[in-house]
Each structure stands twice: as structure tokens, then as C-alpha cells.
Amino acid sequence: MAESKSVVVAALIANGAIAILKFGGFLLTGSAAMLSETYHSISDTGNQVFLLVGLRFSGRDASRGHPFGYGKAEFFYSFLVSVFLFGIAGWESAKHGYDAIMHPHPVEQGPVTLLGATFPAVWVNYAVLAGAIAFESYALKKAWEGMNADIDQHGWSGLGEAFRKTSNVTTLTAFTEDTIALVGAGLALFGVYLSRATGNPLYDAVSALLIGLMLMGFALALAWENKRLLLGESLPKDDERELRDVIEGWDGVDGIVDFRSVYFGPEEVLIAADVTFENGFDTGGIDDSITGLEEALKEANPSIFKVYIEPER
């Protein structure tokens, strides 16, 4: 959790400052791309707030009303991020970009005087977007470190497998968001520059539309990723196979009647199994065997926090 929190805090600080600067650039130049990026950074900032709330809430101890803890809070708040923040920000950005395409207008209002120096207003956009790229690169580096730690821990082949299998949605959300933010800032910089160089506002407007579409696409992907965990996804087949092998190879075990696993939070898995034992085992022997099995399963997969084994005859 500490690693996830540091990733989120780094992104929160970066995005909050960037949102203010981007909005200033929009006010000076009227750039559609800058307004889309403002929506983007505001949604990113809200995103981090939601994720921090989820992290704090999921850390609460189990209670009578929630006997398996509050781990799924991270899944819920990450889902809210995808639906309310990225969905809304993406829609508003795309709508503003489309409107700018249909009703083009100049993207620069005139020179700006700051600290006694006068320069074209578009330079503010260049500076803000260059700064955003620098900040987002730092945040992405932190998020990548978190994702890489998960990949190494589970022995996954890369990001593709991690995206399909990870339960650490906080780090996954921060990593994907920072990647999209970096691409969005690059698109905006490219669009603003082309409109400035050619005098055609269409490039700026198209950049705004693309940023909005990209945000909405990310919202759908993230919502789908959280849906599988909110609905109670099991461990991947390979991980379940390893745990089955532990049980089937245990001294005195005759076979497995039923085996189930489910995520109750990031890196928090519950295991339930109905197991048959060989004839000749008395009640005390079965109890000792079950206790040993529970410890062996937790050792085989550190994500397991609770094991229920029901003996069958």
C-alpha cells in the first residue's frame, strides 16, 4: 500500500499544478487543445483524490458488518474514477474539440507582458505543455516502478499480462492515467504548434477532439478492468493450478471435490476448498492436516489472506 500511495501522491501534486497552468494558457490563447488538457488535468487531480480515499478506506480493519475487510473499496473508487471523472472529462474535451472544428477561431489573442518582457501568448502554451510533459514523465516513472514491482513479484511477462491479471488497481490506474496524460500533452503541444506555424486553427481543434476520444477510451478500459474485480474474479488459472497441486500433493489428501478463489481486495485472496482425505484419518489427524494445508497455501501465494478447507468423505 505504501508504494501505491507514493505513486498517487506524486501524480496528485503534478496534476494539480499542471491544471492551473493549462487553464491560464487557455485564457491567454483560447486554444481548444489547452482547454481539453485543462479538463484532462482536472480529472487527473480528482482521480488521485478518489484513489487516496480508496486507499485509506481499504486499510480499515475487518468488522462484524464487513468480516473480510474493506479491500474492495479500491476497486469501487477506481471504478468511480473511470465513470465520473474520465468519462465526463473525455466527453467535454471531445465536445469542445468538435465545436472548435465546426466553428474555427484563432488560437492566439495577442502578446503577453510578464516581468517587463513581452512575448507571443502562445509561448505560454509551449512552456506549460513542456512543463506538463516533464511533470508527467516523473509521475509515470513512479507509476512504472510500482507496476514493475508487481510484474516481478508475480513473474508476469509484461504490461499486457499485468493489465489482465493485476488486482492492484490503484497503481494500474495511476500508470495508465500518467501514460495518457503524457500522450495528451504531446498531442496538445503538436496541435498548438501546427496551428501557430500554419495559421490554421484546425490542428488545434483536432488535437482537442483526439484528447477527448482518448480519455473516453481509457474510461471504458478502466471501467471494464474494475468490473471484473468488483464482481468477484478468481485467481488466474495458472495460480489456481499451483494451489491445487499443493493440496493434491499433501500427505493424506485423496482429492479435491471443489476449489474456489476470489479477490476481496488488491493482493487479498480468499480460498475455499472441499477436500477428501484417505481412509484411516481420525478427526484430530484431519484437523492437523487442514492447519498445515492452510499455512502451505499462504506460503505458496502471499496474496492469500484467508483459507477455508472443508473435509469431505
Image (cartoon, rainbow, N blue to C red):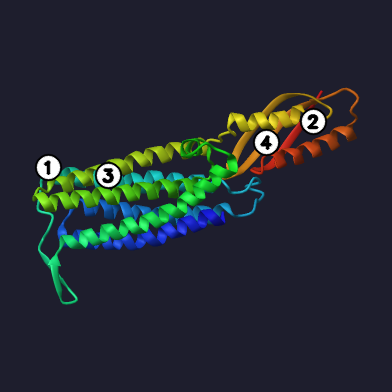
Q: Residue at x 43, y 48 (%)?
A: 175
Asked whether 158 or 209 is in front, the reply is 158
Measured Cα–Cα span from mark 1 to mark 2: 70 Å
Mark 2, mark 3: which one is toward the viewer?
2
Q: Which residue is drawn at 41% across and 48% down?
A: 81
Measured Cα–Cα span from mark 2 to mark 4: 16 Å
Judging by the rendered image, the residue that carries numbered circle 1 is: 102
User: Of helix, strand and loop, which one carries label 2?
Assistant: loop
User: Of helix, strand and loop, which one carries label 4?
Assistant: strand
Residue flagged by tag 1: what amino acid is it?
Answer: Met
Residue flagged by tag 3: what amino acid is it?
Answer: Gly
Looking at the image, which residue sits at the far bottom? 116
Give x and y (percent) for residue 192. 18, 52
Give x and y (percent) for residue 114. 18, 73
Asked whether 234 or 159 is in front, the reply is 159
Mark 1, mark 2: which one is toward the viewer?
2
Judging by the rendered image, the residue that carries numbered circle 3 is: 212
Q: Is residue 170 visible?
A: no
Measured Cα–Cα span from mark 2 to mark 3: 55 Å
Relative vertical location of residue 87 with respect to residue 118 in this rendering, above or below:
above
Residue flagged by tag 2: what amino acid is it?
Answer: Trp
Residue flagged by tag 4: what amino acid is it?
Answer: Ile
First-in-chain label (2 vs 4): 2
Q: Residue at x 64, y 31 (%)?
A: 240
Q: Which mark is residue 294?
A: none
